[in-house]
């Protein structure tokens, strides 16, 4: 997104929801967004600071950083790179698949704060990355399986950008993994979190 871009606020909200972002009253963490009149606050994944987007009708009038603690607007920026909130699908079909696979493996608990109940309502709690295999029909723990045949087309621009994008993705995964204790991971193999000190690895 960049200043002066034609963009509907409703379309942007739909895109954020599809990308796994959570609508909140006040943005405090990565993967959250909030709306107030012509303003939309957004904390993209992989970003050090959140952004405040000011709309004029269906055009981005300004993009600014803001402070999470004080909520005060800081300096202006020209563009925002928006990453998905999760590396796995979070649409209705994926949630239904999660529910189905959960019932195959575990008992369903009725406490509203339980991960099964939260995901069923469309809320993705902290640590949901450890349950990632349940959102996919593939039994793949740590990587995205690419099935041949596939053709790779490379350009100079892609070759230049790929190491940077790969490094950002790795740092993001490590940051998420470091912030969540293994006590959240109780699933049996092959659904363990993959950490060396995790009891189910």
Image: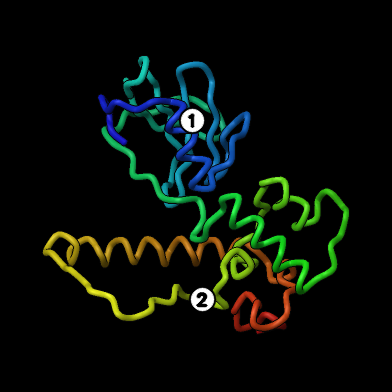
State the residue at coordinates (26%, 67%). 163
Identity of the residue furthest to the left in this view = 156
Q: Name the residue that disc number 2 marks.
A: 142
- Decide: is 42 above or below 132: above
In the displayed orientation, state which residue is furthest to the right. 110
Q: Residue at x 43, y 28 (%)?
A: 52
Along the line of sight, the residue nearer the viewer: 158 or 150: 150
Q: Write the residue at 37% across / 61% down.
A: 168
**What secondary structure is marked by label 1?**
strand
Nearer mark to the viewer, of 1 and 2: 2
Which quarter of the picture shows residue 8? top left
Instruction: Give the color scheme: rainbow, by chain, secondary structure or one colour.
Output: rainbow
Residue 10 appears left or right of 92 = left
- Give the crowd class for mark 2: few <14, some 14-19, many >=20 residues within 10 Å: few
Quarter of the figure with the N terminus: top left
Q: Which residue is mark 1?
A: 41
Secondary element at tag 2: loop
Q: Is residue 164 left or right of residue 47?
A: left
Q: Residues within 10 Å of mark 1 (few under 14, many from 20)?
A: many
**Count of picture labels:** 2
Q: Position of residue 157 (x, y in %)?
A: 14, 59
Q: Earlier in the sequence, mark 1 or mark 2?
A: 1
Q: In the drawing, what numbered circle is on residue 17?
A: none
Foreground: 57 or 28? 57
Residues at discs 1 and 2 in contact (Cβ within 8 Å): no
Quarter of the rendering containing residue 178: bottom right
Relative to 7, residue 130 above or below: below
> What residue lies at 46% left-to-right and 75% top-to-bottom?
143
Q: Quadrant of the C terminus?
A: bottom right
Query: Residue 161: x and y, percent?
Result: 22, 60
Q: CA distance from mark 1 to mark 2?
A: 32 Å
């Amino acid at each position: 997104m960049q200043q002066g871009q034609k963009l509907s606020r409703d379309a942007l909200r739909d895109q954020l929801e599809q990308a796994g972002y959570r609508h909140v009253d006040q943005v405090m963490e990565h993967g959250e967004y909030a709306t107030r009149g012509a303003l939309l606050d957004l904390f993209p994944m992989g970003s050090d600071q959140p952004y405040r987007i000011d709309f004029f009708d269906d055009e981005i009038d300004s993009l600014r950083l803001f402070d999470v603690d004080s909520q005060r607007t800081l300096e202006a920026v020209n563009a925002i790179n928006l990453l998905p909130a999760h590396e796995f699908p979070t649409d209705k079909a994926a949630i239904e698949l999660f529910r189905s696979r959960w019932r195959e493996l575990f008992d369903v608990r009725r406490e509203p704060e339980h991960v099964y109940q939260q995901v069923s309502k469309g809320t993705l709690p902290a640590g949901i990355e450890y349950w990632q295999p349940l959102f996919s029909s593939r039994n793949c723990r740590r990587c995205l399986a690419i099935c041949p045949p596939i053709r790779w087309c490379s350009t100079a621009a892609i070759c230049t950008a790929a190491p940077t994008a790969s490094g950002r993705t790795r740092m993001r995964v490590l940051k998420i993994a470091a912030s969540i204790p293994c006590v959240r991971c109780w699933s049996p193999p092959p659904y363990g979190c993959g950490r060396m000190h995790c009891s189910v690895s």
